[in-house]
Amino acid sequence: MLKKAWLLLVGGVAGLALAFTIDGHSPTATAQQAAALAAQAAGAQPERAVPANPAQLMMSYSPVAKRVSPAVVNIYTERVTQQRPNAFYDLFFGQGRMARPRVEQSLGSGVIVEASGLVVTNNHVIEGATEILVALADRRQYSAKLLFADPRTDLAVLQMDIKGATLPVARLGDSDRAEVGDVVLAIGNPFGVGQTVTHGIVSAVARTGVGISDYQFFLQTDAPINPGNSGGALVAMDGSIVGINTAIFSRSGGSNGVGFAIPANMVRSFLQQAKTGKLVSAWIGVEGEPVTPDTATRVGLDRPIGVLVTGVTAGSPAAAAGLRAGDVIYAIDGKEVGDPGMLRYRMATQTVGETVTATLVRDGAARNVPLRLAAPPETPARSLTTVAGNNLLAGVTVGNLSPAFAQELGAGLPERGVVVVRVDPRAPAARLNFLQPGDIIDALNGQRVATVGDVQRLATDGSGLVVRLSRGGRQAECTFRPPSQVFCRS
């Protein structure tokens, strides 16, 4: 059986309206072309037409590529890792010797978004890098430093040391205007062969649930993109950047025509916040779940779309606006919200303090509700605590979830509860391999857990322990029996 794989587009060495210009002029349709279009609109089979003039033979994507390519860069990174000695040396010289440093190199792509030398790329392109070199299409090279990176969005921003040089700049477009069928170009450095331009169409505009980043909302394209394209540009026919290429779905490691790009509107929001050194998404204070076909029928929707509100946080913008459990939010400012992932994306591209209009259905009737967006509060305090004592949870660090802490951790965590932040490698839970960061501890020995204090109090010394936990929306109950037995059931 062939193995499916998500491939982040790093190579290793270890639109909108279709418009062309030729010589500054836009070719106009001939009478022959107009007749063909009219026949097609009427349902008749249009006759094949010979190009009427040399300008029509010269139609090309070249003007768009020439405009944008200079602002798409190659990014070369180096990172130092620790390499363990091989088994042969362990056999003769013994184990436990110091690991040797090893320099790994990788490459990716990026886009210049400001004349000062600001470059946006993917987080996974530069993660762990100790040295970063940016090479322009005209072969100029500059060292760069990392200004800000965020694994939740898989975006990063670099500052090149340009020493007053003049740089080309790409323009971020409005990715919400992209439609399925729009022609796009993908520009990057696949496999390290050098800058390459490929073309295709937008295959989907709101692809969610693909497991690439915390904000599950991507433009999908069949424009061929390959390892090394990460951080490169997805370009509309007006020359604007509609996305940053980030991953492909591949069984072979190469392009199969299913590529994903982070929408330009997400990139724009990221860049604005990156300059402050902190990424904070707007918050409305609702918990929700996808709408099922049964729920859609019950509330009066013609199809399963939106987010079914299951809880509203007291004192939140949603509470102030009168939202309640049972409401279904299916649009923000007229833009469709298909599921909780799309709602998180819509909030991530808004600004704290703005007012948006949520369209929802309640009691079978649609209504528009204004929501003034707020920053997520850190209430209660996270109170990070490492469990002590002689018990299964000893060495496990837990914290109280809040809207701010949940957003910081990402992964769609709930806004309330107790979360596992770290598991010491020497801890019993690590040796038994049943607990991991991001798990929510719901109950211990049948008693509900609400705070980190409850965990420390209920994690009894020496005796057995029953842990009910949530992971990725799924619940499991694990029973620990000394000295080293764990039985888990979902």
Image (cartoon, rainbow, N blue to C red):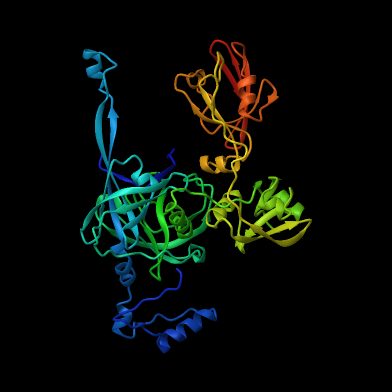
In the displayed structure, would residue 97 be above or below residue 101?
above
Question: On the image, which quarter does residue 171 sit in?
Answer: bottom left
Residue 301 in sight in this render: no
Q: Residue at x 33, y 66 (%)?
A: 68
Expressed as whole percent of the image width and height from the top left, the position of residue 333 reads 61, 63
Which part of the image, by quadrant, shows the C terminus?
Answer: top right
Question: On the image, which quarter does residue 99 sit in?
Answer: top left
Q: Residue at x 51, y 59 (%)?
A: 205
**In screen coordinates, is 49 left or right of 91?**
right
Which part of the image, by quadrant, shows the N terminus?
Answer: top left
Expressed as whole percent of the image width and height from the top left, the position of residue 241 reads 40, 63
**In screen coordinates, is 375 left or right of 309?**
left
Q: Tally the numbered discs.
A: 0
**In screen coordinates, is 306 left or right of 56?**
right
Q: Nearer the viewer, residue 349 or 18?
A: 349
In the displayed structure, would residue 142 be above or below residue 39?
above
Question: On the image, which quarter does residue 330 sit in?
Answer: bottom right
In the displayed structure, would residue 96 be above or below residue 16?
above
Expressed as whole percent of the image width and height from the top left, the position of residue 94 reads 25, 13
